[in-house]
Image (tube, rainbow, N blue to C red):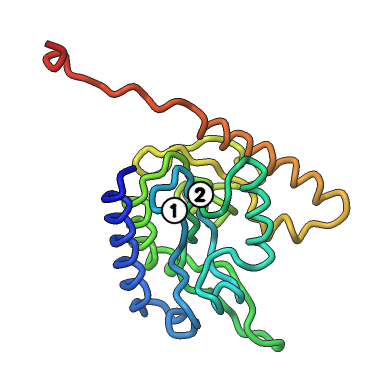
Amino acid sequence: MSLEERARRTRALEEAAAAAGQCRKCAIGSQRRNNVYGEGDPCAQLMVIGEGPGETEDMLGRPFVGRAGELLNKMLAAIGLAREDVYICNIVKCRPTMETPGGLRNRAPEPQEIANCRAFLDRQIDVIRPSVVLALGAPAAKSFLGSSFQITKMRGRWYEGPHGIPMMVTFHPAYVLRQTGGEIDAVKRLVWDDLKQVRAKLDEPPPEPAFEQASLF
């Protein structure tokens, strides 16, 4: 990727992040500390898409920097990728919260919140055009594949994502961390199987360019 193209993509993402920071379509846009747009290599081959920012992410303005982020970094390292090699974001850019007796708690984003934020996610995908998308968790998968998606039955397969980009779905790191006993080992094995498929897909040679017959003469 040329330096000029990298700079163009960086500018485009910065402009989109600024627009996302001004968005107040949802109530959570006024409740958040920071807009958590996304970060990583603008020319990344792998784009990782999660659900939404948590408390630590909201505080720092960066995706996947809490305990789930630490596990995600280990997951990427297991297939030979550093965090800075990929692009990481969520389907919503503000922390979805709910009031509880103990204070604000994280919750899954509501369908309207996902819809309101979709233009920002689409812009990220349009700019980066990764070779592979890794969707983490059911909400991220459903935002692309429909509400009938069942992650326990349908993860670990290849799906056609936006622009025809191959998409793999696996469990969210936060889900893995909530498991106990032998369950966590079983879930980790499933995630590892999915990650190996991602690595293999990334290692496939790029398709040969198509030429019109007239261009050969």
* Residue 129 relative to residue 154: left or right: left
Q: Position of residue 104 (x, y in %)?
A: 62, 83
Q: Position of residue 195 (x, y in %)?
A: 62, 40
Which quarter of the rendering shows the N terminus?
top left
Q: Position of residue 82 (x, y in %)?
A: 58, 50
Q: Which labelled disc corresponds to residue 119?
A: none
Give the SS element for disc 1: loop
- Residue drawn at x 48%, y 45% is 46
User: Are the residues flagged by discs 2 and 1 in contact, CB closer than 8 Å?
Assistant: yes
- Residue drawn at x 44%, y 81% is 27
Give the SS element for disc 2: helix
Residue 138 position (above or below residue 162):
below
Which quarter of the rendering shows the C terminus?
top left
Give the residue pinned by disc 1. 41
Front-lying residue, 40 or 140: 40
**Amino acid at pointer 2:** Asp
* Residue 19 relative to residue 149: left or right: left
* Residue 188 relative to residue 27: left or right: right
Give the residue pinned by disc 2. 85
Q: Residue furthest front?
A: 3
> How many residues crowd around disc 2 within 10 Å: few (fewer than 14), some, or many (20 or more)?
some
Residue 74 position (above or below residue 115):
above
- Residue drawn at x 28%, y 49% is 5
**Amino acid at pointer 1:** Asp
Front-lying residue, 120 or 79: 79
Q: Position of residue 149 (x, y in %)?
A: 55, 47
Per the model, the C-alpha gap separating discs 2 and 1 is 6 Å
Residue 177 position (above or below residue 23):
above
- Residue drawn at x 44%, y 53% is 41
Quarter location, residue 165 = top left
